[in-house]
């Protein structure tokens, strides 16, 4: 049996968007990164503990700030406990 009206054929999928070409690092623009790597390695070798202590403090306070922004009621309870522990009454 032949159709009176031809049926539309399968639609072709749209072509994928072109991917951007990756940026290839060159030797000229990698010098500052290499110098920063060497400077960081030297500083970490000679001053391990102060840098680790500063990084731990910064991470701790950034985490507290994130908790304050993300979970304000939870931080209210945590800070109430901390205030209670650091309070100067009843020894």
Image (cartoon, rainbow, N blue to C red):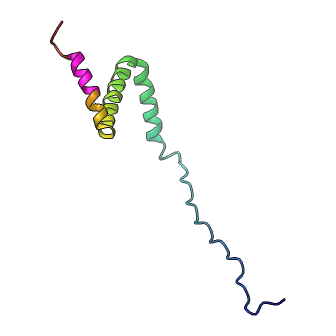
Rendered position, 33 above or below 43: below
Stretch of the chain drawn in magenta? 78-86
Q: Is residue 22 left or right of residue 76?
A: right
Q: Is residue 80 magenta?
A: yes
Q: Is residue 71 left or right of residue 30?
A: left
Answer with the quarter of the image where residue 10 lies: bottom right
Q: Is residue 21 magenta?
A: no
Quadrant position of the C terminus in the picture: top left
Query: Closer to the camera, 28 or 85?
Result: 85
Quadrant position of the N terminus in the picture: bottom right
Counting labels gives: 0
Query: Closer to the camera, 52 or 68?
Result: 68
Residue that appears at 42% across and 29% down? 40
Rendered position, 17 above or below 83: below
**Furthest residue in direction right, as rendered:** 1
- What is the x, y in percent for residue 52? 38, 22
Rendered position, 13 above or below 83: below
**Furthest residue in direction top, as rendered:** 91
- What is the x, y in percent for residue 41? 45, 26
- What is the x, y in percent for residue 84? 22, 18
- What is the x, y in percent for residue 42? 43, 24
Residue that appears at 72% across and 85% down? 7
Q: Is residue 80 left or right of residue 44?
A: left
Residue that appears at 52% across and 45% down? 27
Answer with the quarter of the image where residue 19 lies: bottom right
**Furthest residue in direction left, as rendered:** 89
Residue that appears at 36% across and 23% down? 51
Q: Please name the predominant secondary structure of the magenta segment in the image.
A: helix
**Furthest residue in direction bottom, as rendered:** 4
């Amino acid at each position: 049996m032949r159709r009176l009206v031809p049926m539309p054929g399968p639609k072709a999928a749209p072509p994928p968007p072109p991917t951007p070409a990756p940026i290839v690092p060159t030797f000229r623009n990698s010098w500052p990164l290499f110098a920063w790597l060497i400077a960081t390695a030297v500083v970490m070798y000679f001053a391990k503990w102060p840098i680790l202590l500063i990084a731990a403090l910064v991470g701790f306070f950034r985490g507290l700030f994130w908790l304050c922004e993300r979970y304000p009621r939870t931080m209210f309870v945590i800070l109430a406990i901390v205030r209670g522990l650091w309070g100067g009454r009843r020894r």
